[in-house]
Amino acid sequence: MHCCCTVCNLRDAMDKTGRFEYTEKNNIGERLTKTRSDRKSSTPYAGSEQVKTRDAIPTLNKASDQDSQIVNSQQRTSVRTKMNPSRASALSDVACAVKTVASLATQNETIINTDMPFDGTDSASLLVRTKKRQKEKADKCRKRFKSESREIRRLSETADVLAEIINSGQVSMATRVFLNKDFEIEVIGKLLETDKCSRSDVQNILNSCVEMLMSEMKKKVKSVWLGFRQMYPNVPIFVLISYDNGIKLSEKDIPNSFRSFEFVFRHEFEVSEEAREITKYEENKQTQMCERQRREVKITLSKNIDQLLKCHRNIEMVGVSSIRSIKYGHRNARLITGYCIVVYVHVKGIIPYGEKEFPRRIEHFPVDVREGKFVPYSNVPGAREYHQCLLMGCQIVRCKGSSGTLGGFLDLQDGRVGILTCAHVALTEEERNTYLDSSSDEQLRQHISIPWNTPRMGQPDEYHEFGTVLKFALKPGGPSEVGVDAAVVTITERAREPVCGAFPKNQCSASGFTADSPMEFPSGHCTKIEDRMEGCEVVKFGATTDITRGLIAHNCLHARRSHVTDMAFKEFMYNQMEITPLHGFHRFAQKGDSGAIVFMAKRGNRNKLVAVGMVVGGTTSDTAVVTPILDILKALDLKYLCFKTFDPCPRPRQLLSLEDLKKGQEKQSKQITDQEKRFQRQINRLEKEIKKGVARTHEMIARLSRQIQARR
């Protein structure tokens, strides 16, 4: 069909319906504008009319109640700016109800005279009045049915004309129609119900609308993607992800050309409390998988993870759990103990356009969908202590970048000393992308060396530089391979090289360490994570949270890096460890702890530590994401025993101030006084007991003497 024929057909269809008119403004192009000439004459699908009909017709009442429940559930999570999308599907029920009531009213009209007076005493008069009221309501339903029929015909004619425009290849014109402020979203449903236009063509137009919306709101919105709800597959929904800056978006921020669509607003890390509540429940119940079932669920997940990520681009993380949640947010919500595969998404209940819903089961394991995201634990530079000789766990800062934690010290092959931390701490996102683009695939599988004197690191801020980034590894991994996010920094300032394997703070009674038995890592030993270690206790020292303890939940978490704004780009980190905080700790790690080494105590000695992993981030459910340490060393081409060893040395005594000495003396004198008082009370009690004993002895002697005299 030629362009001129399409325009003529569009003009004819608009003139027939009387609802649209074809105009040309400023010779820009064709546009569709909606006129309101006959809106007053036609009866809309209004809420007030629905309430009146609901009182009269039981059959209509059921459909209306269901419709209102659906609308209320949608309004809790989204913003609707047009009429109810389910009204066309309920027209068949309305028609049946109208015909039924109309037939009853017609039959009763010939039997009962509706003009009889009502005196309040005759029961027949009451019946007549009731039948008259039913007839009036049936007439209203009949008028409403005619109005809805005209509405359906009008939408169908508009959809037919729009389908001709799309099939003729005029995508720009169809996009302008979609973005008209008076465009009705129900037309899209009519387009998808018929075979005159393919779903892919409609999706391409909607994708162009997404790009236009993103370009207009790029300062407020981080990403935009298109989806739909399972109950309404023909109603598109725009999901807007805003920056986590405390500014909340609303429908007022939407451009006028997009007001006819439905929107869902979320912050970058805004999720529901479902995953966090389940994590706390698992901590309290201490539910653990048996070895056989744990092995089976991991094998099942590793076999199907690639296919799952390929079919669903909105997945944020994938893991396993021993608790399954059913109908969260409803009255009959419950938790079931059972091994399941957990799929984390940012917005639950909305399916990306062009995809299907998640499978109910993967092989013989059920699938539980929760809201959650991976959060890198780098932080903005903050004021931390300065250490002339660097210590493990202190804060390090990328110059003009974010901050993290100094993980551990390394003995490099050239005799220099290096430190281990995360790549997203040592390099900015632009630098990482630059080096990744300039490297081959073979280099990505190994590690990337960086030219000398490029990115520099400081401690505790960028004004106190101590070294440069030597190399980094940033790879996603695979179903049987661990993803790595790590970097090696060379210490160029000799005066700041470490002299011991200590940490900045050496006393934390809540974590089991004291001044006599501080937290140290002089051995440099590391070990491999195995399945049998799940449920074991671990400890770490971070620049933000200091000493914290946790439990290894599992080592099969697959997480998508949150700094990626494009949903189609899959930068996943496979086979990570998930650490839950031990009872008494709110979190195992927070922002600023990226790069901290996670340790496990040796058997028989709680303070002899062995490295098992490194913190790379966390989740929105207060758990930490840790990469196994041996996989990090392998990706960076480092030896197994590359951690620097130190000789254990006694902790130097700290000089006390006069105030501390006075407080200590007062405390000791108070303890001595309390002890003297306690001893004096014991002596007084013993004296009383002795006196009582002597008095009883004298009484016994006197009694015996009297008995002897009485016998004589």
Image (spheres, rainbow, N blue to C red):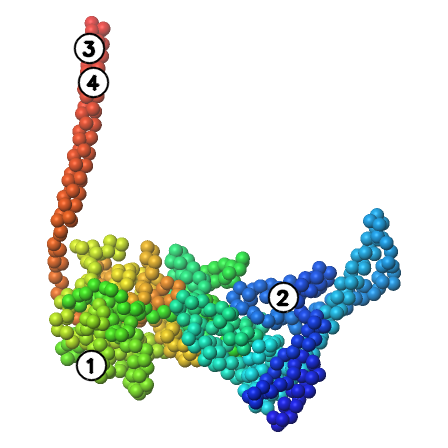
Identify the mark nearer the N-term, 3 or 1: 1
Q: Secondary structure at mark 1?
A: loop
Quadrant of the rendering where the C terminus is positioned: top left
Give the residue type at disc 4.
Ala
Name the disc covering residue 453, or none: 1
Name the disc covering residue 308, or none: none
Identify the mark nearer the N-term, 4 or 1: 1
Tag 2 residue: 67
Q: Secondary structure at mark 3?
A: helix
Tag 4 residue: 695
Identify the mark nearer the N-term, 2 or 4: 2
Q: Position of residue 288 (x, y in %)?
A: 38, 61
- Left or right, 205 with respect to 708, comes to right
Please name whichever residue, 126 or 37, is drawn nearer the observer in this view of the structure.
Answer: 37
Q: Position of residue 647 (x, y in %)?
A: 12, 65
Give the residue type at disc 3.
Ser
**Residue at 50% across / 59% down in the picture?**
334
Give the residue type at disc 2.
Asp
Tag in front: 4 or 3: 4
Please name whichever residue, 78 or 303, is drawn nearer the observer in this view of the structure.
Answer: 78
Identify the mark nearer the N-term, 4 or 3: 4
Tag 3 residue: 705
Give the residue type at disc 1.
Asn
